[in-house]
Amino acid sequence: MTVPPNKNLANQNPNSISRDVVLDLLPLYLAGEASEDSKQLVDGYIHANPEFATWLKENQASLIPAAPLSPSAQLEKETFMKFKTEQRRKSFLLALAIFFTAMPFAFIFEGDKGLVWWMIKDSPSQAYGFLFIAVCTWVGYIWSSRDKTEA
């Protein structure tokens, strides 16, 4: 597919553009994604260059981009759902980490005794178990919060 020669009309019309600029704008123009100003520039060039207009009609099908230029609604929905699921998982891990961290330090107020640390005092092995689970959930939370965009 040979593009017709560049007929730069800059000397005749100060608003004209070069063939190379038009060729750069063609994929957007043909996909209907070009701005109004770009559409007017391309239309003006096509009307001023009948040879280019003929070439464009013959080769239009091969110039249209194969894939859409903007993401599909389905892709956007899937991306949003993945993000939402990841945020829920991180929130759940954070809640678990806080709970298991605080649990060994649980206390109650008893009238004459005052503050009573019931987990650490009465059951230190359970307290250590909760702390171990807390460390694991904090590691999971930090791991899930890392930047996953590294290539």
Image: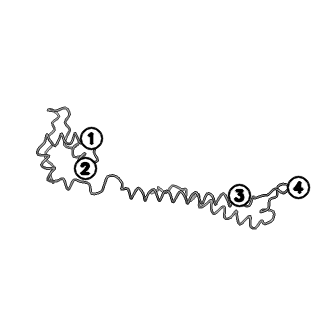
Q: Earlier in the sequence, mark 1 or mark 3?
A: 1
Q: Earlier in the sequence, mark 1 or mark 2?
A: 2
Indicate the quadrant containing the C terminus: top left, top right, bottom left or bottom right: bottom left
Q: Quadrant of residue 115?
A: bottom right
Q: Which residue is located at x 21 percent, y 46 percent?
A: 23
The mark closer to the camera, 1 or 3, is 1
Q: Is residue 55 left or right of residue 98?
A: left
| Residue underneath mark 2 | 27
Q: Give neighbour class at mark 3: few <14, some 14-19, many 20+ (Cα, 10 Å).
A: some
Q: Nearer the viewer, residue 45 or 20?
A: 45
Q: Is residue 139 left or right of residue 35?
A: right
Task: Give coordinates of residue 15: x percent, y percent.
Answer: 20, 34
Q: Earlier in the sequence, mark 3 or mark 2?
A: 2
Q: Secondary structure at mark 4?
A: loop
| Residue underneath mark 3 | 102
Q: Tag 2: residue type? A: Pro
Q: Which residue is located at x 76 percent, y 67 percent?
A: 125
Task: Give coordinates of residue 51: x percent, y percent.
Answer: 11, 45
Q: Earlier in the sequence, mark 1 or mark 4?
A: 1
Q: Tag 4: residue type? A: Asp
Per the rendering, the mark at residue 112 is: 4
Q: Quadrant of residue 6?
A: top left
Q: Which residue is located at x 22 percent, y 40 percent?
A: 40
Q: Tag 3: residue type? A: Ala
Q: Give neighbour class at mark 2: few <14, some 14-19, many 20+ (Cα, 10 Å).
A: some
Q: CA distance from mark 2 to mark 4?
A: 82 Å
